[in-house]
Structure formats: structure tokens, C-alpha cells
Amino acid sequence: MSDDIQAPTTNDSINPELETSYQTANKIKQQVEQVLIGQSDVLQQALVCLFASGHLLLEGVPGIGKTLLVRALSKSFGGDFSRIQFTPDLMPSDVTGHAVYDPKSEKFRIRKGPAFTNLLLADEINRAPAKTQASLLEVMQEQQITIEGNAYHTDKPFMVMATQNPLEQEGTYPLPEAELDRFLMKVYMEYPEQDDEVLLVKKITTGQISNTALLDMVQEVATPEDIIKGQQIASKVEVDDSLFDYAVRIVAATRKWPGIRMGASPRASLALIRCSRALAMLNRQSFVTPDEIKQVAAPIIRHRIQLSAELEIEGISVDDVIKDILNQVEAPRQ
């Protein structure tokens, strides 16, 4: 196999459908950026996840805009939005729905839960016990929910954005590996830069906008059908054979890397290709380059590997290890 990438097309001959999807994504980004100040990287990764037809795990402290991101994103394309506040007493039926007996008709009818939506915010997902967490497994993987033996499909597009607080551990239930693996990407949402925070505080406290009116600034610039079309276009972005090999070599390196107790599964290899295709579309490219794979590698791999106790004691983070792997695994020549 050649190590040289043969670019199949150039931006001068870009597919008109890809151009349309790029413009749609760009309009959505512009709308959300109006209210989500100082989180451009997080927004970019959320859009990659959306157009790659995946689910996103957001980790960050309270008050930095996680809920705002999901609500603004759903409003920008006219999608339905639901929020579930996960608590220790939350039941699986509170997520998926259940059958209710109707005495008038003397029949059971299905009451669909909040999971039947386009964008589902699972807030503080690690506060619910494993049984309730597991209620999301089927809908995340199959985009359907089984109630009383009958399968009901969710609307499309469908995306779960789950949040968890990285600092507070009391009263929480760590997500099992099987559920973590269902999330296409894990993104860290950090504090905004000082200048961005000053702008945010100034806007809200000087009457330019209010907390409740913030979402009124977001205009509907697309439809759910546009998102579905964009997902289809992203899945067709061309990938050279050498890049399939590159993605697999990165993931395979996690399975034998010193200090990694558990490496990533083939699902990570699939995710690298899916997300690099979506990122290429967002970059207005009709083909993937090694740079796209490198950019999405950390959010795809970081929740799929486990470090040894020795590395954790030394203060080495998962992202440090991923960076070392990317530096060591040779990329194809462009």
C-alpha cells in the first residue's frame, strides 16, 4: 500500500451537495456562536458528532453553557429538544416511557418518554444508577426503544448529549465501559478565556441580553431534513486506503502502549473515519487528510482507554498519552 495520499478531488471541483451541507453547518455554527461565547472548539466538535450521526459526552463544571449548547443547537435547525435531569431515584421508564392503562378504553396505551426527540440532554448522567443509565443503550445504538415488547423508532436526526461533572464524585455512579463506548466523542468543556467571559458578563448584565432571552437570538436556519442530508453527505466523503490503515494503526497502538491497561476497540477505528469525514465536510473538503484524523483522535479515544495506576500516580493524563501515540504512529504523506 502506498504511503502517499491521492486526493480524489479539489475544492475547485467540490460536490454541490457537499457545498450545500457545508453552508448549512456554517449557518448553524454562526447562530450558536452568538450565545455560546468562548466555546468555539466545543461547538466544532459537537457539530462533527452531529454530522457523524453519533452521541456526545460533555464533561465540565456547572455553569459553563452545556445546556445552552444543546438548546441552541436544536433551535438552529428546528429540532425537538428534551432534557432529563438524572438523579439516583430516576427510573428507566422515566427515560424511555411506559404503558399506561386507560380505564375508558380498557386498553393500555403507550406514553412515550423524553428520549423520543431529536436532541436529548442527559444532564449529570452519572448520578443515576446503572439500571437507568442502561435504558439509553438501546436508543443510542439502534435509535429505537422497546416498550412492552414493541419497538418504537425515534425521530431523525437523533443525538444524545450527556453531561457529567468531573469534580463531584459523591452520589455518582461511574459509566460502565459498554455505555462509554456508545458515545462517539468525549469532549472537555473548559472555562472560557478571560476576554470571552468579560464579553459574556457585559452582555448579560448591561441589558443587551438576559438569561431567559438568550435563545431568542438563535434563528432557525436549517431543518431536520438538512441535518439528515448532511449526515449522508459526510458519510460519502472520500477516504484514501492509506488513511483507513492510519486510523487502525492509531487504535491498535493503544492496545500495546506501555502504561495503557485497556486499549480501544475497533469501534474507535470506525469512529475515527466517521468523524474525520464529518470534519472534512465542515472544512469544505471532499476528501479526508491525516490532519482531520489527528484532530478528532483525542475526543474519540480518551474515554475508550484506561491508564495504569503508575501513570495516574505520575500525573500523566489520557490526552498526554494520546498525543505521544500520534507523534509515534507515522502518518501517510500528503
Image (tube, helix red, strand yellow):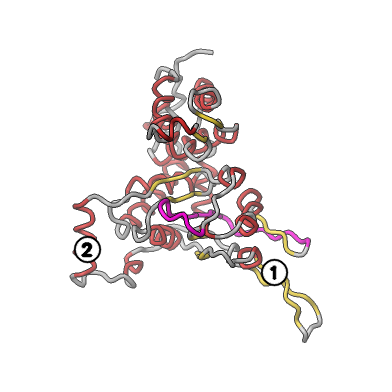
Residue located at (59% from left, 47% from top): 176
Q: Quadrant of residue 95?
A: bottom right
Q: Position of residue 149 (x, y in %)?
A: 78, 61
Mark 1 lies on a secondary structure that is: strand
Q: Position of residue 270 (x, y in %)?
A: 57, 34
Residue underneath mark 2: 201
Q: Quadrant of the C terminus?
A: top left
The residue positioned farthest toward the top in the image shown: 2
Query: Relative to residue 178, is residue 42 drawn left or right?
Result: left
Nearer the observer, 132 or 142: 132
Q: Quadrant of residue 87?
A: bottom right
Q: Which mark is residue 148?
A: none
User: Which residues are drawn in magenta?
Assistant: 149-171
Q: Position of residue 328 (x, y in %)?
A: 42, 19
Nearer the observer, 34 or 126: 126
Q: Amino acid at mark 1?
A: His
Number of on-image labels: 2
Residue located at (77% from left, 85% from top): 103
Mark 1 vs 2, N-terminal side: 1
Q: Quadrant of the N terminus?
A: top right
For marks 1 and 2, give the CA distance. 43 Å
For the residues bearing labels 1 and 2, Cβ distance under 8 angstroms: no
The residue positioned farthest toward the bottom in the image shown: 104
Residue underneath mark 1: 98
Nearer the observer, 311 or 141: 311
Residue 240 shows up from this direction: no
Residue 315 shows up from this direction: yes
Q: Quadrant of residue 152?
A: bottom right
Crowdedness near tag 2: few (<14), some (14–19) or many (≥20) residues, C-alpha within 10 Å: few
Q: Amino acid at mark 2?
A: Val
Q: Position of residue 18 (x, y in %)?
A: 45, 41
